[in-house]
Amino acid sequence: MNLNWPIVLMIVGAGMILAEVALGGFAGFDLVLMGSILVIAGSVGLWRHDTFLALLVAGALGIAYLAVGRRWVRHRIRSRQVPSNVDALLGQTGVVTARIGKHQPGRVKVLTEEWLALPAADVAGPFEEGAHVTVEAVDGVSLRVK
C-alpha cells in the first residue's frame, strides 16, 4: 500500500488544530501553528504532486517556527498581569484617619481611597490618627494593617 503523504500531512495537521481548539489552547497556540504548517505543506505537495516537496516544506517551516516564530508568538499572546485594586494595596503605606484599636475598627487612607481598617493579627497596639501604617492583608472590605 502506497500512502499519499501530502494528504497524511493535511489530516495530521487538521487533527492538531482540532485538538488545540477542543482542549482550550492547552499548548499555548503551538498545535494550531504546527498543524497549520502541516496543512500548508500537504497542500503544496498536492498542488505540485510532489511528496518530497511537501516533506521539505513541512520541515523547513517547522524548523523556522521553532527557531524564530515560537518566541515571537509567545511574546505576542502572553497575558500581562495588571494588579487589581486589592492586590495593588498590599504593602502600601497609608495614614490613619480614625483611631484603630485591637477590637475597634478605624479608618485608613491608602493612595486615594479611605478604607475600614483593623490591626493585623500579630499587632497588639492601637494606631492613633495621623500614624503611618502598612497594609498587610485585605479581609473582605477591611484592611489589616501593621
Image (cartoon, rainbow, N blue to C red):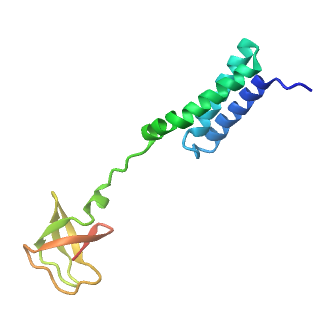
Q: Position of residue 86 (x, y in %)?
A: 30, 60
Q: Quadrant of residue 107?
A: bottom left
Q: Residue furthest left?
A: 130
As drawn, 108 above or below 86? below
Q: Is residue 85 left or right of residue 134?
A: right
Q: Which residue: 51% across, 37% down?
A: 70
Q: Residue furthest bottom?
A: 124
Q: Quadrant of the C terminus?
A: bottom left
Q: Residue furthest right?
A: 1
Q: Quadrant of residue 88?
A: bottom left
Q: Position of residue 57 (x, y in %)?
A: 65, 24
Q: Which residue: 66% across, 27% down?
A: 58
Q: Which residue: 22% across, 85% down?
A: 102
As drawn, 9 above or below 93? above
Q: Position of residue 2 (x, y in %)?
A: 89, 24
Q: Nearer the viewer, residue 87 or 12?
A: 12
Q: Quadrant of residue 47?
A: top right
As drawn, 77 above or below 14? below
Q: Quadrant of the N terminus?
A: top right
